[in-house]
Amino acid sequence: MLDIQKIRADFPILSQKVNGKPLVYFDNGATSQKPQVVIDAIEKYYSEYNANIHRGVHTLSQLATDAYEIARNTIQYHINAKYNHEIIFTSGTTFGINLVAHGFASIIKSGDEVMISSLEHHSNIVPWQFLCEKTGAKLVVIPMNEKGELVVSEFDNLLSEKTKIVAVNHISNALGTINPIEYIIKKAHEKGAAVLIDGAQATPHLKPDVQALDCDFYVFSGHKICGPTGVGVLYGKEEWLRKLPPYQGGGEMIAEVTFEKTTYADLPHKFEAGTPNIEGGIVLGTAIDYMNSIGFDAIASYENELLAYGTKRLKEIEGLTIYGTSENKASVISFNIDGIHPYDIGTIIDKLGIAVRTGHHCAQPIMQYFNIPGTIRASFAFYNTKEEIDIFVEAVKKAQQMLS
Ligand SMILES: *Cc1c(COP(=O)(O)O)cnc(C)c1O
């Protein structure tokens, strides 16, 4: 059992008032709030040992390098990667996917296929379109059904020896659907295709085990798991990271540079050109430690309770439709109310201190499927409460009255 009041006290922002009302923060799918330990770790880094890493022999540089590499190990253990050099620090999920998609240009040929799903975030669509434009490969899309689930039989039909990589999200940010990635990974591997999992929306709710999953790449962002913005992780199996070319050239990623030829540094540095987000990397380790101190089993079961309660309460509202009704769902509720634009509801409830996301959630193809301009999305974290859900539901009812 989680002590929610104690957890909430860890997050200074949660005791704020917004527009004169206590903040109800239900936009966790966009970014999470930060606990005091994370805020303190940022301050500690800049006030006590800020220095560039991997270069200097001086004491501060050593301290910063050690902290950065300890964070890499923390991430390795957290996702159960085999080696710490399989953990590449990035600026976020978007960067990680672009890195892999860019690298595949040297592997993929015209006539090959790249498979994504109809549930993807734009970050996991556009980089693959770039890849297909560059190489002449074909983009193949796994369809979804009206519950917002991927149609597995269609995936089976679309998969072939032509498929070189399958890129799907673990959990959909727009609908909350938890995708059957174990099955997708297994089947894709049978055809010799690599698999990239976009874990941006899964890592806030669960602890992925990349070896058990056997995925080839797993990407996520620090800012959605209580860490800072501007830092993220690309996990890649060693053999794949050796095969892919570097993404950016610069300092740190080289072994030797002459004007005739440059040789690249070993992993992970090959993919970490330039001065990284040192503070971000270190503090991402702090954030992961914090979430583990709460425990992902407890987080998942509590969030499931919030999801069930929020779903039940919202269904009381007449004319309300929930999009994404899979049995396997994370704590995300996307909905609309008949005859009312999602933006108008979002604006009114903001005046009541409630933060939700309105719009297409960077997943326009999903909105096209349902033939809607967007949705209102409430996404719950482990620091949210049923009382907040009650406040939210009353606010939505009030907005509905005002707008109809
Ligand atoms: C947030 C999100 C992204 C993009 O993450 P950035 O931190 O903006 O790079 C990609 N995919 C999913 C599923 C997301 O939720």
Image (tube, rainbow, N blue to C red):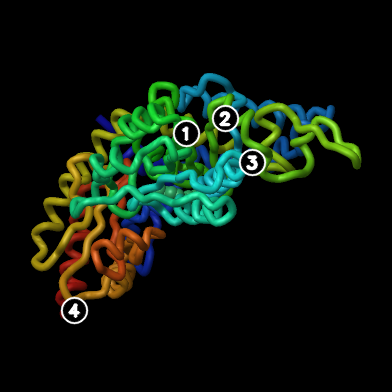
Q: Which mark is residue 240?
A: 2
Q: Is mark 3 on a helix, strand or loop?
A: helix
Query: Which residue is depicted at the point 12% across and 51% down?
Result: 312
Q: Distance between the residues labelled 1 and 2?
A: 9 Å
Crowdedness of circle 1 by 10 Å Cα count: few (<14), some, many (20+)?
A: some
Of residue 95 and residue 196, the one placed in the foreground of this image is 196
The residue pinned by badge 3 equals 279
Callout 1–callout 2 Cβ contact below 8 Å? yes
Q: Where is residue 36 in the image (x, y as percent from the top left)?
A: 49, 42
The image quarter containing residue 114 is top left
Callout 4–callout 2 Cβ contact below 8 Å? no
The residue pinned by badge 1 equals 194
Q: Which residue lies furthest to the front in this view?
A: 111
Amino acid type, mark 1: Ala
Q: Nearer the viewer, mark 3 or mark 2?
A: 2
Q: Is mark 2 on a helix, strand or loop?
A: helix
Amino acid type, mark 3: Glu
- The earlier-in-sequence mark between 1 and 4 is 1
